[in-house]
Amino acid sequence: MKSTKALVLTAIVAVVTASSAQAQLFINCGGAGEAVIGASSTTCRLTNTVSATVPTVARLTITSLTTTLVAPLAADFGTAAGVNSAGPTLNVKANAGYTLTASPAAATWSGPATSNKQATDLKMVVNGPGTFVPLGQVGTSANPTATTDYAIGYNTVYNWTTDIPGVYTLVVNYTLTAP
Amino acid sequence: MRSLFTISITALLSSALPGVAVAQCNGGPLVAGHSTCTLAVTATAVINTVAKLSTTSLTTTLTAPQAVDFGTTAGVTTAGPTFTVKSNRAFALTASAATATWTGPAGTSKPASDLKMKVGAGGTIVALGSVGASSAGTAGTSFDIFYNTIYNFATDKPGAYSLVVNYTLTAP
């Protein structure tokens, strides 16, 4: 009898309690091992930290891998003025400082037998007009660049005694370095 | 007064019918000879709006970019975490960058907008925003996140970068 009375009272209390309650909004964020940085009655938030390691990167491109020099005339031999020819344009993209240099791959040109034409007979100018200088530094920057062009102009000196008729070639290396 | 009267009647019946069980129903009649009575109890439950958001990982390490990845709109895609929503009503899940720029090497200011996302491997790459929404509850809906990152020669100096992405679950 006592237990029955207790049940009745409990039921009444439960009904009264439920009737006075109002629906609430609960959002539970995450589970074990998950961080919750913010939660309220209407929103919850989890974070995802995205990490990237950006290496030093650079790109060097060129408009042409070969250049055919303007054929010299008799008047061009034995003069310091030499003969000008348009060369390629190099483009640098880098996310750090860089240096671009030009250098001959050999001390002498490849040419007819017994020829010994010096690599120093080829000079260059960058983004001319300007003064032709020996192959060397093309450009440098302490800062990154999205795109920088270097237009190369060549100047070739010809000599009566060393430049016998024939076909001559010289490989020029363009080297991009990140200091 | 009434309770006293009820008690007295109960006592009287108990004494008049020794050995007979008597159940007392609240406010109801007492019936001699019956050992049980039935009461209708109304059980009321208040179910709140509840939702749960979980993730497979709190961090994502992006694929290191190559030189060819810089200056392109294609970017570099990396698999990110999976978020699971459980909700007993409509919900919306959104992603947003916690800051306008990435944390990175000194002097850098990589925009947060360089990080894009797609939901599901076959999704479309879009800016951070809506991940998913439903007009009904769900016992478990997963959203696979893929990140796509744009890199720029001029702004993305070598170094370590990080960006916090907030995933917010709301019950509209």
Image (spheres, coloured by chain):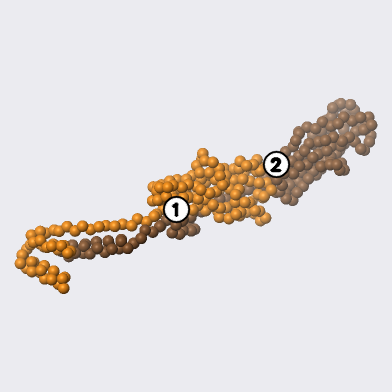
Question: Would you place residue B93 above or below residue A3 in this image?
Answer: above
**Camera-nearest residue between A85 and A58:** A85
Residue B113, image x, y percentages: 60, 49
For image coordinates 67% across by 50% down, the residue present is B155
Question: Would you place residue A127 above or below residue B46 in this image?
Answer: above
The answer to whether residue B147 is visible is: no
For image coordinates 15% across by 71% down, the residue present is B2
The quadrant where residue A16 appears: bottom left
**Label 2 sits on what residue type?**
Arg
Quick one: quadrant of the N terminus of chain B? bottom left
Chain A: colour as depicted: brown
Residue B166, image x, y percentages: 52, 53
**Camera-nearest residue between A53 and B137:** B137
Question: Would you place residue B96 above or below residue A125 in this image?
Answer: below
**To which residue does mark 1 refer?**
B172
| Disc 2 secondary structure class | strand
The answer to whether residue A23 is visible is: yes
**Camera-nearest residue between B123 and A148:** B123
| Mark number displayed over residue A59 | 2
**Label 1 sits on what residue type?**
Pro
Q: Chain of mark 1?
A: B
The nearer-to-camera label among 2 and 1 is 1
Chain coloured orange in this rendering? B
Residue A89, image x, y percentages: 77, 38
